[in-house]
Image: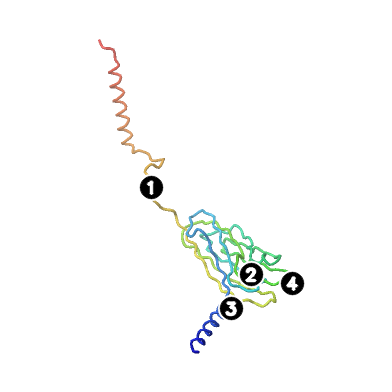
């Protein structure tokens, strides 16, 4: 009997922990690390959320290494209805995209599960580790009750590519001394050829 009680307690604990999983806001990019001067797409997604009706957040980034070029809406909210979307205000000096937000409208339930909320395009401008983080988080359900959400930051590595040098790479110029020796050799060969071709007396 004790074994059955322990089994039922463990099953209830597992079910409760899944039901009360805290939704997580995160950002990902591929490839990571990347290279200077490249375009990077950062996908912002939410996981394990129930009845999401509206959200807002601010994205913070290292402006000395990243410059934002555009923001587009993710598909998650649109799976359950029409949305009202605002792409936020890009400030590439401060390194912020302020108040990215979207909301369903009408009498409908919110979206549940996991999915993409936004996609941000960046241009890399240097080398190093570029941090991306979140602030100003507000998430509402369809009854306009606030949903508690945790946020996970991202670090984008930006590295100069390195590798072995190809010995046959075009553009390698001989040393001046080597050029001089080559010219002397050509002149000598030309003189010998003329002497061999000269008419004999």
Using the image, tell me which numbered label, if any, was put on residue 56: 2
Relative to 101, 174 lies left or right? left
**Of callouts 3 and 2, which one flags the residue occurring earlier in the amino acid sequence?**
3
| Residue at 33%, 37% in the rendered image | 176
| Residue at 48%, 87% in the rendered image | 3
**Of callouts 3 and 1, which one flags the residue occurring earlier in the amino acid sequence?**
3
Relative to 119, is 162 above or below? above
**Of callouts 4 and 2, which one flags the residue occurring earlier in the amino acid sequence?**
2
Q: Which residue is mark 4?
A: 107
Relative to 107, is 91 above or below? above
Q: Which residue is mark 1?
A: 165
Check contact, mark 2 vs mark 1: CB within 8 A: no
Q: Which residue is mark 3?
A: 19
Provide residue 182's location: percent of width, then percent of height: 31, 32
124 or 151: which is nearer to us? 151
Using the image, tell me which numbered label, if any, was put on residue 11: none
Provide residue 110's location: percent of width, then percent of height: 67, 71
Check contact, mark 4 vs mark 3: CB within 8 A: no
The residues bearing labels 4 and 1 have C-alpha atoms spaced at a distance of 63 Å
For residue 39, which quarter of the picture?
A: bottom right
Q: Check disc 1: other Cα within 10 Å, few if <14, some if 14-19, many if 20+.
A: few
For residue 113, which quarter of the picture?
A: bottom right
94 or 98: which is nearer to us? 98
Indicate the secondary structure of the residue bearing disc 1: loop
Provide residue 91's location: percent of width, then percent of height: 60, 62
Check contact, mark 4 vs mark 1: CB within 8 A: no
**Of callouts 4 and 3, which one flags the residue occurring earlier in the amino acid sequence?**
3
**Of callouts 4 and 1, which one flags the residue occurring earlier in the amino acid sequence?**
4
The residues bearing labels 4 and 2 have C-alpha atoms spaced at a distance of 20 Å
């Amino acid at each position: 009997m004790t074994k059955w009680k322990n089994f039922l307690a463990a099953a209830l604990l597992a079910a409760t922990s899944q039901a009360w999983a805290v939704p997580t806001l995160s950002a990902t990019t591929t490839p990571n690390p990347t290279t200077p001067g490249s375009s990077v797409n950062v996908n912002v997604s939410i996981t394990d959320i129930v009845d999401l009706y509206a959200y807002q957040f601010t994205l913070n980034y290292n402006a000395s290494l990243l410059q934002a070029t555009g923001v587009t809406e993710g598909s998650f909210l649109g799976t359950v209805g029409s949305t009202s979307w605002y792409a936020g205000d890009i400030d590439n000096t401060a390194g912020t995209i302020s108040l990215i937000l979207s909301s369903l409208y009408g009498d409908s339930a919110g979206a549940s599960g996991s999915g993409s909320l936004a996609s941000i395009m960046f241009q890399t401008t240097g080398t190093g580790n570029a941090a991306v983080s979140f602030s100003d988080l507000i998430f509402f359900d369809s009854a306009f009750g606030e949903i508690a959400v945790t946020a996970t930051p991202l670090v984008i590595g930006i590295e100069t590519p390195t590798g072995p040098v190809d010995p046959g790479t075009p553009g390698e110029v001989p040393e001046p001394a080597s050029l001089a020796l080559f010219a002397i050799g050509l002149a000598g060969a030309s003189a010998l050829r003329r002497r061999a071709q000269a008419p004999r007396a």
